[in-house]
Amino acid sequence: MIDYYSLLRRDIRFVEGLNACMNCGVCTAICPAAEFYNYDPRSICNILMTKDNEKIEHLLKTDSIWYCGQCLSCKTRCPRGNVPALLISALRHLSQVTGLFTNSEKGRQQYAIFKTIGENIINTGYCIHLALINLKLHPEQGPVMVWYKENAEDVTDLLGANYNKLGEGALRKISQDNLDELKKIFNITGGTDLYNSINKYSKTKAKELNINCEDTIENSAYFFHVFLSKE
């Protein structure tokens, strides 16, 4: 079995996030996610302190590590200085690079995030931009958003924006030089490798499920499967 604990120890977020949990449960009591999901930061700390790789592997396969909202409320209350939110970040990264994220519903949804927000950032410099909103994925936006998109240039001009044009201002077009620099940052920091890992393991999972997984969202049945599914 893979020594998951040793891999976690290489992550500075893990090193700084776990000192010595005394099982007081304050992190769970203050956690907003624990109020709404089957999520218990205290139990996650307990599992990690056992150094049991079978238990850690199971954790990497579950929805639990994807419920945390990274608000860091746990950091403000822990009497021992533990930060369960940082532990979650380290667990998420390990789950992504090992492909274990594809074993849970919330984990598989990382592919949808990568294909929308992730690719948006790389290709345009924006995580969300009016021109990038796919209304088929967001019917809750209603007819007002349809009208807004159709008349975006006129409306944004009235609001003082610089819609899809070079220069300064909101919604401006990001220059190619800046986009190239952004891609270099992703390459150097490991972001590109992480995206490639999510893409690779997601396509493997799609093949296992016999679901089409194309690079373009419109032609990818797997994208809609993970975006819309609720187990």
Image (cartoon, grey):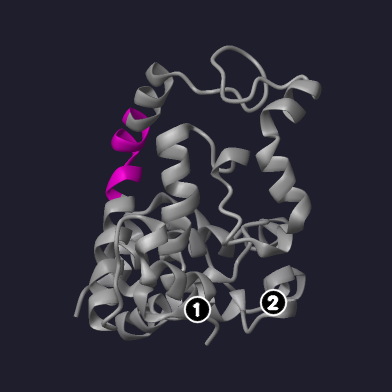
Marker disc for residue 63: 1
Seen at 41% across and 50% down, the residue is 12
Compared to residue 18, the image places residue 226 above or below, namely below
Is residue 79 at all visible to an observer of this figure?
no
Label 1, residues with CA under 10 Å away: few <14, some 14-19, many ≥20: some
Is residue 196 at all visible to an observer of this figure?
yes
Looking at the picture, which amino acid does disc 2 mark?
A: Ala
- Residue 134, percent from left and from top: 56, 53
Q: Nearer the viewer, residue 152 or 104?
A: 152
Compared to residue 172, the image places residue 51 above or below, namely below
Q: Is residue 191 magenta?
A: yes
228 to the left or right of 54: right
Q: Nearer the viewer, residue 70 or 213?
A: 213
Q: Indicate the quadrant where residue 61 lies.
A: bottom left
126 to the left or right of 34: left
Name the residue carrying label 2.
Answer: 34
